[in-house]
Amino acid sequence: MGGLHKYLKTNEGQMKEDLIRLMEAESPTMDKQAVDACGDVIRGLFKDYFNETPTVYPETVQGDHLSFTIGQGTKARVLFLVHFDTVWDKGRLTIEEKDGRLYGPGAFDMKSGIIQAVWSIKSLFDTGISLDGLTIDVLCTSDEEIGSQTSRTLIEETASKADLVLVTEGPVHENGALKTSRSGVGIYELIVRGHSSHAGSHHHAGRSAIKELAHQILHLEGMTDYSVGTTVSIGIVEGGTRVNVVPDYARATIDFRVKTMEEAERMVKAVEGLTPFTEGVTLEINGELNRPPMERTPDTVQLFAMMKEAASKVGMDLEEAHIGGGSDGNFTSGIGIPTIDGLGGYGDGAHANHEHIVIDELPKRTAMIAETLKQLQDHGFTKQSD
């Protein structure tokens, strides 16, 4: 066991205590007071461990965003990207330690990732390893779980100054793999307006919005192409007023996922260009590409190779994977910054009642991040495109 891993294993108990404090500060996205209270716990960690205070980005509805900067080195500028809001209403889950696992709100998504970011930096300081070649930014956002509505611009502006981005969301739960690519996400609403009429005596005069929507659903779902990683799902369908009325209104939500920006642009054009199958019916289409794809680029490959080497020093055979879900890493990758995701606590149950991490994996995965920072301190990071 190397020095960094040994140090972190020795401090596993304190890492767990810090994580429990963060979890106890429950932070459902739409409860600003609770989210800001969780932000205060994060401020305390950075004050106690690094004597650092944040730049605060105030919000009126969601919690305030926080940014910390450690060091002024020029070899590499690293951005840790984390969020501290959760999907859980206060009191919905209890915190419990059982069979080597820590259960509770945010354990996996993603408060363990915050602790790993903090302790990876702390481990280097406390073991006497210089970080004078690095500038490390830690951006803590408060609204990822509702689509990063207030934080996206801040994320992109902060990432534009970085050489690379480390996202400490949870890894692939089956094997702990890092996420070197994620699908882009398009979210749209399709509204169909037809003409109502009596379903019996004047059926011929009606233009059924539901019938038209059925055609559109089959058309949209038919755009799914697994060979290129494109999927389309209609998640919500509603319409009509009475059983004996030809419906003049119907609505559906559209979720599409794509692996590349080229495919994203094609799908946006296809969805926004939908036309009616039925004469006399109109369509209204609202939405956008919510998150661009996080693509696996040569720079990502180089960064993953560095992390795989770091992982080998702590006894991990690290793998990589593509994930269909999006994260804030999609935004940083979308502006061309090399991004690796899935560095957080190993476990399972994101957005599920059994959300948890495996406790003894916490120091190991933190050591992997610390070893990566050490490599960056020693060698920097040069983009393939530079």
Image (cartoon, grey):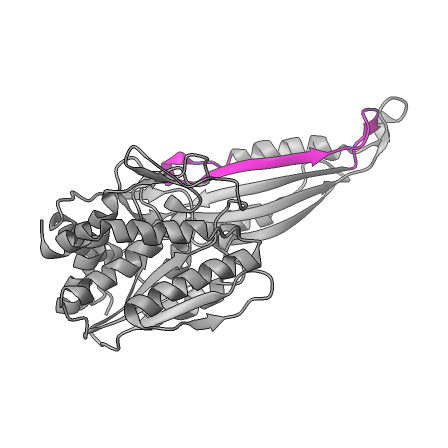
Residue at image position (65%, 43%) is 190
Q: Position of residue 265 (x, y in %)?
A: 47, 53
Res. 6 visible in picture: yes
Residue 355's x, y, as percent?
40, 38
Magenta includes 269?
no
Residue at 40 percent of width and 42 percent of height:
324
| Vertical side of 228 occupied by 115: above or below | below
User: Where 381 falls versus 198 (above or below)?
Assistant: below
Query: Residue at the location (23% across, 49% down)?
Result: 12
Which is nearer the eye, 91 or 129?
91
User: Is 111 positioned to the left or the right of 90 in the image?
Assistant: left
Q: Quadrant of residue 7?
A: bottom left
Q: Where residue 242 sits: x, y (%)?
A: 82, 28
Q: Position of residue 289 (x, y in %)?
A: 51, 53
Instruction: Say above or below: 346 vs 341.
Output: above
Name the residue nearer the viewer: 82 or 223. Answer: 82
Residue 192 occupies quadrant? top right
Q: Nearer the viewer, residue 80 or 28?
A: 28
244 displayed left or right of 7? right
Q: How many marks?
A: 0
Q: Which residue appears farthest toward the top when viewing the image? A: 200
Span colored in magenta? 222-248
Is residue 239 within the magenta segment?
yes
Please state which of residues 44 and 253 is positioned toward the viewer in this rendering: 44
Instruction: Identify the image quadrant of the C terminus.
Output: bottom left
Identify whether 325 is placed above or below 166: above
**Horizontal arrangement in the rendering, residue 244 relative to residue 27 (left or right):** right
